[in-house]
Image (cartoon, grey):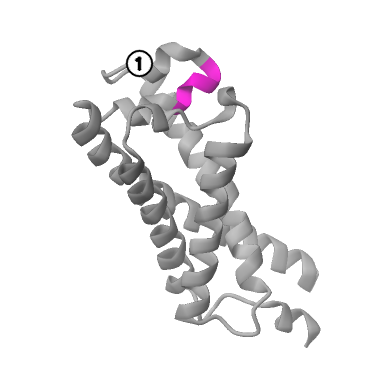
Amino acid sequence: MGLTTQFLVNTAQRAIKDGLLAAALSGGSMAARSKADSGSAVAGVNAPAHWVHGEESIQREDVSAKHTLVGAAIHTASAMLWAGLYEALQTRRERRTVAGALVDAAGVAALAAVVDLKLVPERLTPGFQHRMSKESLWMVYGSFALGLALGGLQRRGEAPTVRDLRE
């Protein structure tokens, strides 16, 4: 496997790991804030399943495979996709720093929020915005950013940058 191919594979692996951590932290925040705002911890987790099952998923407040598992899977897949952008930003840095990780994570989370809540058609929104306050949404996207940054910082010394491709 060539250096470029290995670089891409390693970047994808890191994006998956960062995305899983970001999904776990933001999912936990989503459940806590959903409970506080709507009375049901799973209401926010169910909501992304509206991509597949329509409005019914946004209204569900109980645990079910149809809504909860699908909603959690969509949330996790989305987090891994955004983590790919985060990793791409991190690899462009000459060296990985705490400040760089935090700036890139905050930027990706902010972009994700704008895309999720303002740019995509209603059917492709996360849906949980209908079950939580604006303050709670800030917490969810903030915990998402924290998850990205923590994931990236865990492997900071071993993660290559574009400089490694030039050498």
20 above or below 100?
above
Q: Judge left or right: residue 149 versus residue 4.
A: left
Mark 1 secondary-structure assignment: helix
Q: Residue at x 32, y 17 (%)?
A: 64
Image location (x, y in percent) of residue 153: 45, 73
Identify which amino acid the numbered label 1 is placed on: Gln
Q: Quadrant of residue 36?
A: top left
Residue annotated with mark 1: 59
Q: Residues within 10 Å of mark 1 (few under 14, many from 20)?
A: some
Q: Nearer the viewer, residue 138 or 56?
A: 138
Image location (x, y in percent) of residue 100: 53, 77
In which quadrant is the C terminus drawn?
A: bottom right
Q: Judge left or right: residue 15 versus residue 20.
A: right
User: In this view, which residue lies farthest toward the bottom?
Assistant: 167
Image location (x, y in percent) of residue 157: 51, 82
Q: Bounds of the magenta span? A: 48-52
90 above or below 118?
below
Q: Nearer the viewer, residue 138 or 14?
A: 138
Q: Judge left or right: residue 32 versus residue 51.
A: left
Tell me, yes or no, if residue 24 can be seen here. Answer: no
Determine if the magenta segment contains residue 50: yes
Q: Judge left or right: residue 49 versus residue 134.
A: right
In which quadrant is the N terminus drawn?
A: bottom right
Q: Residue at x 50, y 13 (%)?
A: 54
